[in-house]
Image: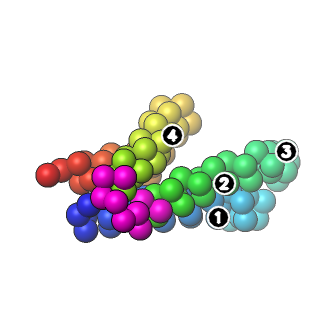
Amino acid sequence: MSYIAQAVILLVAGIHFLILYKQMVTWQTPDGLKQFNLTPEVSKSFKLLAFQQGLYNGFLAIGLVMSIFVSNIQYAQYTATFFLLCVLSAGLLGGFTVKKQIFLIQALPAASGLLFLWLK
């Protein structure tokens, strides 16, 4: 796995750790309300859902980081591919159904990671 692929994979993982933080920690704070364009009432009613989504984003980030430290190169590449495809899928769905910005934040970096990962 090239250093560029590893750097992009770590960038995608960092994005998802940040999403975890925003969904699990700042969801009901003034910054979270502004970030997600929520009222306090709506934020409160979706608090547990956001917490769970944050956990899923953390799983994606951990899987991506784990792929960097796997000693078997083929297994590392397959692991990174799986988690990048998960992120790409989520980014495409979110970009088409929720907000176009999600495409840029999630799908584009994941697609770049896949490109650099499989580029020979």
| Label annotation for residue 21 | 1
Q: Which residue is label 3 attached to? A: 45
Crowding at mark 1 (Cα within 10 Å: few <14, some 14-19, many 20+): some
Going by the numbered disc 3, the residue's amino acid type is Ser
Q: Is residue 63 magenta?
A: no
Mark 4 / mark 3, whichever is N-terminal: 3
What residue is shown at x 56% (from left), y 64% (from top)? 18
Determine contact: label 2, label 1, CB under 8 Å. yes
Mark 2 / mark 1, whichever is N-terminal: 1
Mark 2 / mark 4, whichever is N-terminal: 2
Residue 86 visible within the image? yes
| Label annotation for residue 54 | 2
Outermost residue on the left side: it is: 120
Q: Which residues are magenta?
A: 66-75
The residue tagged with tag 4: helix, strand or loop?
A: helix
Q: Is residue 84 above or below residue 35?
A: above
What residue is shown at x 54% (from left), y 60% (from top)? 62
The residue tagged with tag 2: helix, strand or loop?
A: helix
Q: CA distance from mark 2 to mark 3?
A: 16 Å
Going by the numbered disc 4, the residue's amino acid type is Ala
Determine contact: label 2, label 4, CB under 8 Å. no
Residue 112 visible within the image? no
What residue is shown at x 26% (from left), y 61% (from top)? 1
**Which secondary structure is most common in the magenta stretch?**
helix
Going by the numbered disc 1, the residue's amino acid type is Tyr
The residue tagged with tag 3: helix, strand or loop?
A: helix
Q: Residue 7 location in percent, x, y?
A: 32, 67
Q: Nearer the viewer, mark 4 or mark 3?
A: 4
Q: Which residue is label 4 attached to? A: 90
Side (left or right) of 84 relative to 41: left
